[in-house]
Amino acid sequence: VQLQASGGGVVQAGGSLRLSCAASGRTFNGYPMAWFRQAAGIEREFVAAISGSSGSTEYADSVKGRFSISRNYARNTVYLQMNSLKPEDTAVYYCAVDLQTRYRPTTNSGEYAYWGQGTLVTVSS
């Protein structure tokens, strides 16, 4: 099983990026997927999550209205569209899969079983 995150890069404040996380080895269509991030010297924090079937989503307060999570079941891929980026969004972004089928996805990183390798997002001021 592998989660391959991509799409990170350097962008100016106010700009946009779209992250992708492609899963291989098995399908995760019935399970919640999420994005977390970790900035230098700070603990990993929840960003956004999407359920496996109900389509329900959860967002951190810091990204509500700016970020949008979605998934493509045919491609076994989850996306994170990030708009109006701020310097404080600078971090390594990780995707993850929860192997519990929940109606609403959890924001607890300890519940996620598989993790991608991370992709770096740098927002310059």
Image (cartoon, rainbow, N blue to C red):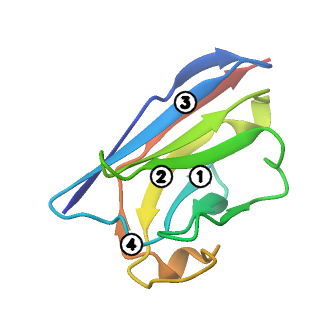
> Disc 4 and disc 3: Cα gap in Å?
23 Å
> Disc 2 and disc 3: Cα gap in Å?
13 Å
Q: Which mark is residue 37?
A: 1
Q: Which mark is residue 18?
A: 3
Q: Of the residues under marks 2 and 4, which one precedes in the sequence?
A: 4
Which of labels 2 and 4 is toward the front? Answer: 4
The picture places residue 86, in percent across and down from the top left corner, at 79, 30
Q: Of the residues under marks 2 and 3, which one precedes in the sequence?
A: 3
Give whichever of 90, 26 is nearer the camera.
26
Using the rendered image of the protein, determine whether residue 44 is visible from the camera's viewpoint. Answer: no
Q: Going 35% across and 54% down the picture, which residue do you hit?
A: 116
Which amino acid does the dot numbered 4 rest on? Gly
Secondary structure, mark 4, is loop
Q: Residues within 10 Å of mark 4 (few under 14, many from 20)?
A: some
Q: Going 57% across and 42% down the picture, which residue do you hit?
A: 80
Q: Residue tagged by mark 4?
A: 30
Q: Are marks 1 and 2 in contact (CB under 8 Å)?
A: yes
In the displayed structure, does residue 48 sit left or right of residue 74?
right
> Disc 1 and disc 2: Cα gap in Å?
6 Å
Relative to residue 25, is residue 67 depicted above or below?
above
Q: Are marks 2 and 4 in contact (CB under 8 Å)?
A: no
Residue 114 falls in image quadrant: bottom left
The picture places residue 10, in percent across and down from the top left corner, at 57, 18
Q: Residue tagged by mark 2?
A: 94
Residue lying at the far left of the rendered structure: 25
Give whichever of 79, 61 is nearer the camera.
79
Which of labels 1 and 4 is toward the front? Answer: 4
Q: Of the residues under marks 1 and 4, which one precedes in the sequence?
A: 4
Secondary structure, mark 1, is strand
In the displayed structure, does residue 31 sit left or right of residue 17?
left
